[in-house]
Amino acid sequence: MSALDRLAATIAARKGADPDSSWTARLLARGPEKCAEKFGEEAVEAIIEAVRGDSERLTAEAADVLYHLLVMLAARDVTLADVEAELARREGLSGLDEKAARG
């Protein structure tokens, strides 16, 4: 089991937890919109670090992005397995062809 799989499982387990006992539960209790907002904030922070060129800070921000992405997905009952299945479906397709197929 990968670190992402373990993180996704932890997030799923916290979905019904007391918001006072878990940051993840607190985010999920605030709803999908707040989860999406936090994901966006973390993505912007990662972009800033990518532009600055600080690999250590970018690594830390990328970890935050992945965490908040998984929380946002969980808020809408989308699993990591769902995303992996979509990636597998796209495997072997040219990025240009895949984009064109989406119209």
Image: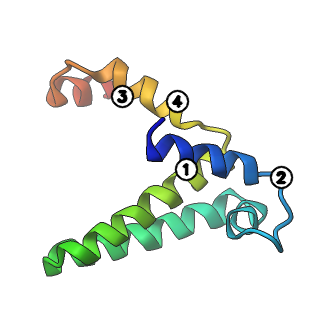
Q: Secondary structure at mark 2?
A: loop
Left or right side of 86 for 95: left
Res 7 label: 1
Q: CA distance from mark 2 to mark 1?
A: 16 Å
Tell me the number on the disc at residue 81: 4
Q: Secondary structure at mark 4?
A: helix
Q: Residue at x 52, y 29 (%)?
A: 82
Which residue is disc 2 drawn over? 16
Closest to the camera, between mark 4 and mark 3, is 4
Position of 19 compared to 82: left or right?
right
How far apart in space, not on screen, are marks 3 and 2 (Cα)?
28 Å
Mark toward the start of the polypeptide (2 vs 4): 2
When the figure is inspected, residue 8 is found, relative to residue 89, above or below; the finding is below
Q: Secondary structure at mark 1?
A: helix
- Give the mark nearest the N terminus, 3 or 1: 1
Kind of residue sitting beneath label 1: Leu
Pinpoint residue 46: horizontal percent, then vertical percent. Answer: 31, 71
Query: Residue at the spot x=55%, y=45% of the render?
Result: 6
- Circle 3/circle 2 CB separation < 8 Å: no
Q: Which residue type carries mark 3?
A: Leu
N-terminal-most mark, 2 or 1: 1
Label 4: how many Cα within 10 Å (few below 14, some 14–19, many 20+): few
Q: Position of residue 55 (x, y in %)?
A: 18, 72
